[in-house]
């Protein structure tokens, strides 16, 4: 994973029945944060009949793909970690970001913040990176931490 170059991407490989023949096709599904926007894609290639399809979109990722990333991704589920000083000021700003980005109501934003602060929040790495980026933009120190990592992944980070 890389942060800071504008792109955070995670993808998983799997097999699906081919729509063009009776064979099994290779698929790659991914989700990424590309210059501040979430994108997703799925590419299916069949070695048997040569059929190839690509589907992609921006914004909300299809739930089957999201679930697959959370279940099988190398970097997901990731955690969003707030590293600066806490307090009600930060809470208000953070909840504002959650409501604007995720369309949550106040109760939902509060529940999400509680989840994050208690270390129980799980998202795909690109989703966590998106929120971290949005939080940093309003002055809240936040990082997306990939699965299996406990520390801030950014070398030289002092927060
Ligand atoms: Zn085929």
Image (cartoon, rainbow, N blue to C red):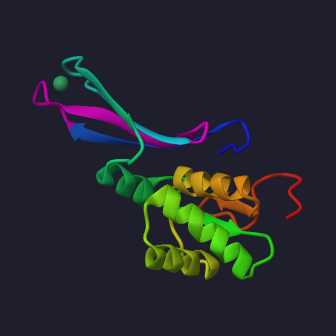
Expressed as whole percent of the image width and height from the top left, the position of residue 24 reads 21, 34
Above or below: residue 99 compared with residue 63: below
Closest to the observer, 14 or 70: 70
Expressed as whole percent of the image width and height from the top left, the position of residue 93 reads 66, 68
Closest to the observer, 37 or 123: 37
Horizontal side, residue 88 vs residue 42: left or right: right
Residue 117 is drawn in which quadrant? bottom right
Above or below: residue 129 compared with residue 13: below
Q: Which quarter of the rendered image does ligand 1 occupy?
A: top left
Closest to the observer, 88 or 152: 88
**In this picture, which residue range is highlighted in magenta?**
17-36
Horizontal side, residue 93 vs residue 68: left or right: right
Above or below: residue 145 compared with residue 48: below
Residue drawn at (62%, 65%) of the image: 80
Expressed as whole percent of the image width and height from the top left, the position of residue 133 reads 66, 52
Q: Is residue 34 magenta?
A: yes
Residue drawn at (38%, 48%) of the image: 60
Horizontal side, residue 99 vs residue 54: left or right: right
Above or below: residue 15 compared with residue 48: below
Residue 142 is drawn in which quadrant? bottom right
- Image quadrant where one finds the N terminus: top right
- Image quadrant where one finds the C terminus: bottom right
Mark yes or no: residue 127 visible. yes
Residue drawn at (74%, 82%) of the image: 87
Kindly report the secondary structure that dominates the magenta region of the rendered protein. Answer: strand
Residue that protrudes farthest toward the left in the picture? 22
Residue drawn at (64%, 54%) of the image: 134
């Amino acid at each position: 994973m890389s942060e800071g170059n504008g792109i955070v991407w995670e993808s998983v490989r799997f097999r699906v029945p081919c729509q063009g023949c009776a064979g099994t096709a290779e698929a790659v599904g991914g989700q990424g944060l590309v210059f501040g926007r979430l994108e997703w894609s799925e590419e299916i290639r069949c070695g048997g009949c040569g059929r190839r399809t690509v589907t992609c979109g921006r914004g909300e990722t299809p739930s089957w793909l999201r679930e697959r990333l959370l279940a099988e991704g190398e970097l997901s589920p990731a955690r969003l970690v707030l590293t600066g000083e806490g307090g009600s000021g930060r809470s208000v700003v953070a909840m504002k970001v959650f409501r604007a980005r995720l369309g949550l109501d106040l109760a939902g934003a509060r529940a999400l913040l509680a989840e994050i602060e208690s270390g129980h929040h799980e998202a795909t790495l690109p989703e966590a990176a998106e929120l971290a980026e949005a939080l940093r933009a309003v002055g809240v120190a936040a990082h997306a931490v990939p699965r299996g990592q406990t520390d801030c992944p950014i070398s030289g980070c002092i927060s």
